[in-house]
Image: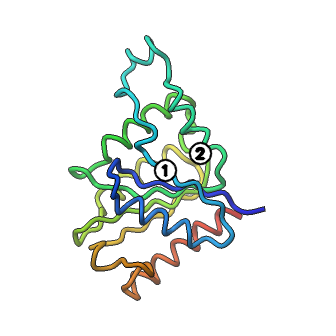
Amino acid sequence: MSTKITAMGASSSRASINKKFAEFAANQIAEASINLLDLNDYEMPIYSVDRQAEDGIPDLAHQFKAQLKEADGIIISFAEHNGAYSAAFKNIMDWISVIDSDVWCSKPMLLLATSPGPRGGATILDIALNKFKWMNENKLVGFSLPSFKDNFGPEGIKDPALKQDFEAKLAEFVAALL
């Protein structure tokens, strides 16, 4: 039986480099069954307690949460929008957090970030790692890839030192899946 990985880029961009990076990371796991989510498929009204009281939780939030529950592990690569989560990701997270308190279904998580710039989304990755440790009791592993266009190509991560660091982080995540 293969390991089930749910992966996503935390961006609504159709050409998201973070979606590409999440898919790449998932594909590095031997014999994994990969479920690549597109946040555009889960577009919902902006979360508010009033909207929740009036209309309930949208079916799309339940569908998204079901994808997480079916996974053995979750990979998210974060786009950094003005130093924080993209609005699309934050809204989905807000909706799924009211379904139950175990937001990420106690699954091991590989949290990634990349950007065209030299910090590689390090700010949002730090925010996510610090936030998610309160939302998930399982293993969290983080890796940031700077300067995506310079350091990533058809074969994956180009820079040997970055590739080695990524592979070590991926191995930590895979070990948590067992």
Q: Position of residue 28 (x, y in %)?
A: 56, 73
Vertical placement of 69 versus 143: above or below? above
Q: Give the label on residue 133, or none.
A: 1
Residue at horizontal 22 percent and vertical 69 percent from the top: 117
Q: Does residue 35 appear to the left or right of 4 in the view shown?
A: left
Please identify the residue farthest to the top as the structure is shown.
54
Q: Given the image, on which type of amino acid does mark 1 rest? A: Lys
How far from the left and from the top, in percent, is residue 112?
42, 62
Mark 1 or mark 2, which has the lower sequence index?
Answer: 2
- Quarter of the image with the N terminus is bottom right
Q: Which mark is residue 68?
A: 2
Classify 121 as above or below 66: below
The answer to which of 102 and 75 lies nearer the viewer is 75
Answer with left or right where residue 80 lies relative to residue 33.
Answer: left
State the mark number for residue 104: none
Give the number of the mark in front: 1 or 2. 2
